[in-house]
């Protein structure tokens, strides 16, 4: 309960802070907000040990939970109890696995079929603030399928993050066209489960945030990554502010960044 109140207070303070200042740019000579970085941890739902380890990381994180796995529901309940925002990490069809029966959204699916699949996944993890795609290099290139995803998210009043597993993804622009609060992944942080690689990927993320006002990056619940995140809290640059995805979208809305 204490953690939930602490997080709720933090969110309220962020909202009040961003509303308190008019939008000012560097050329106006006024106050400049610090660049913000939102880190999403993908592929949760398979291990409660991983969830427990992540819950102790002092950085603001957003959890992405794959639905229908052994610990999906309990991971979501833990996040809710601790005030950690989470999104549904929805499996979508990849180019390497055409017709994958485990993909809940596939290219060529009718919009109503897509909506039903998204709806069921969301309802399986109550409390989710939104959704991002797991894999999906094929499905996210299909405008019709993505329209179905966004229609359901719009009906539920939720946000969308394009994981950008394909350079040809249309998911983000379709989300914006649908009127959703949306953003997109800019950096995959842990292709390699090595600290030196993570450091370099975070440097790239910080550079993008400084250039654009903010950046979203994705990592995974891997041993090396979970060892590194607490260290990152200690070594993070002073000019960077870490935020959750909902907070990031609030900053983006007020700041008017282009992504």
Image (tube, rainbow, N blue to C red):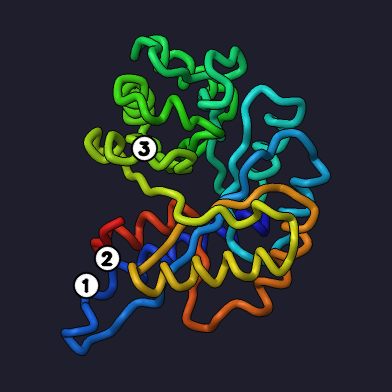
- Closer to the chain start, of discs 1 and 2, is 1
Q: Which residue is mark 3?
A: 168
Q: Residue at x 64, y 70 (%)?
A: 199
Quarter of the C terminus within the rendering? bottom left
Left or right: 99 as drawn, with respect to 246: right
Residue 83 position within the rendered picture, expressed as x and y whole percent measured from the top left: 60, 51
| Residue 255 numbered mark, or none | 2
- Closer to the chain start, of discs 2 and 3, is 3
Give above or below for 36 relative to 116: below
Q: CA distance from mark 2 to mark 3?
A: 27 Å
Q: CA distance from mark 1 to mark 3?
A: 32 Å
From the image, state whether disc 2 or disc 3 is nearer to you: 3
- Name the element at disc 1: loop
Q: Nearer the viewer, residue 164 or 131?
A: 164
Q: Residue at x 22, y 86 (%)?
A: 30
- Name the element at disc 2: helix
Number of residues whose C-alpha sits closer than 10 Å to that of mark 1, classed few (under 14), some (14–19) or many (20 or more): some
Q: Quarter of the image holding residue 252?
A: bottom left
Give above or below for 27 relative to 225: below
Would you say residue 122 is visible in this rendering?
A: no
Q: CA distance from mark 1 to mark 2?
A: 6 Å
The residue most toward the right is 49
- Name the element at disc 3: loop
| Residue 23 numbered mark, or none | 1
Residue 147 position within the rendered picture, expressed as x and y whole percent measured from the top left: 30, 24
Q: Quarter of the image holding residue 34?
A: bottom left
């Amino acid at each position: 309960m204490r953690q939930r109140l602490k997080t709720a207070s933090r969110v309220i303070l962020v909202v009040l802070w961003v509303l308190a200042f008019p939008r000012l740019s560097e050329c106006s000579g006024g106050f400049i907000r610090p660049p913000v970085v939102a880190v999403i941890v993908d592929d949760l739902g398979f291990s409660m040990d991983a969830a427990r380890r992540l819950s102790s990381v002092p950085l603001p994180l957003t959890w992405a939970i794959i639905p229908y796995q052994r610990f999906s529901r309990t991971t979501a309940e833990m996040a809710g109890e601790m005030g950690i925002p989470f999104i549904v990490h929805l499996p979508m069809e990849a180019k390497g696995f055409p017709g994958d029966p485990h993909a809940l959204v596939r290219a060529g699916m009718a919009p109503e079929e897509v909506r039903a699949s998204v709806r069921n996944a969301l309802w399986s993890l109550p409390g989710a603030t939104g959704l991002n795609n797991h894999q999906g290099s094929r499905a996210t290139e299909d405008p019709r399928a993505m329209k179905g995803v966004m229609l359901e998210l719009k009906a539920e009043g939720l946000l969308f993050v394009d994981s950008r597993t394909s350079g040809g993804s249309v998911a983000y622009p379709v989300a914006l066209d649908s009127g959703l609060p949306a953003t997109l992944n800019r950096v995959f942080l842990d292709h390699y489960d090595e600290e030196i690689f993570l450091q370099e990927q975070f440097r790239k993320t910080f550079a993008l945030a400084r250039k654009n006002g903010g950046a979203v990056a994705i990592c995974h619940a891997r041993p090396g990554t979970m060892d590194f995140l607490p260290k990152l809290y200690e070594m993070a640059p002073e000019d960077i502010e870490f935020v959750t995805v909902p907070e990031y979208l609030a900053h983006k809305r007020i700041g008017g960044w282009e992504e």
